[in-house]
Image (tube, rainbow, N blue to C red):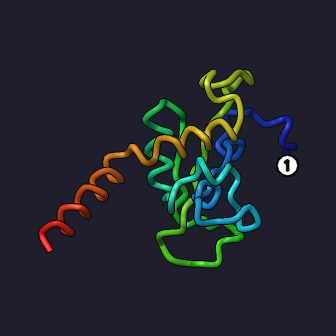
Amino acid sequence: MACAAARSPADQDRFICIYPAYLNNKKTIAEGRRIPISKAVENPTATEIQDVCSAVGLNVFLEKNKMYSREWNRDVQYRGRVRVQLKQEDGSLCLVQFPSRKSVMLYVAEMIPKLKTRTQKIGGGDQSLQQG
């Protein structure tokens, strides 16, 4: 079996992993959050992370049945892992604006609240409260 350095950065097993727990403002750092709580998002899903990454032009794929090891809740909502390609075959960056995994996580956390699914849920909730 070849070592990691010998494999191409374009191999899918060399893509970076992003679990929803990395971006969740409900988690502590000990529970797996990897970005500042001020920039984190409330309960992000793997599908939302995939949507944001693919919209910006990153090569991405979703592994639905993977789970973060520190995640104690086994619900479907918390499942999933997104693999993102940062570097091309020759070792150069795919997108210059994303030199590191942290830059991808911060961008995704910034964009998830702007997704249509998130904005519609907020708007729909306000209307139902007004009618009641």
Q: Quick one: 2 or 86, which is closer to the camera?
A: 86
Which residue is label 1 attached to? 1
Which residue is at 47% across, 69% downward? 77
Q: Quick one: 38 or 120, which is closer to the camera?
A: 38
Crowding around mark 1 (Cα neighbors within 10 Å: few <14, some 14 to 19, many 20+) is few
Q: Quadrant of residue 23?
A: bottom right
Q: Secondary structure at mark 1?
A: loop
In the rendered image, the vertical position of residue 104 relative to residue 112, given as above or below: above
Q: Position of residue 119 (x, y in %)?
A: 32, 50
In the rendered image, the vertical position of residue 103 relative to residue 35, given as above or below: above
Q: Position of residue 128 (x, y in %)?
A: 18, 68
Q: Quick one: 55 or 11, which is closer to the camera?
A: 55
Q: Position of residue 13 (x, y in %)?
A: 69, 47
Looking at the picture, which amino acid does disc 1 mark?
A: Met
> Image check: 87 left or right of 47?
right
Q: Position of residue 33 (x, y in %)?
A: 68, 58
> Image check: 99 left or right of 112?
right
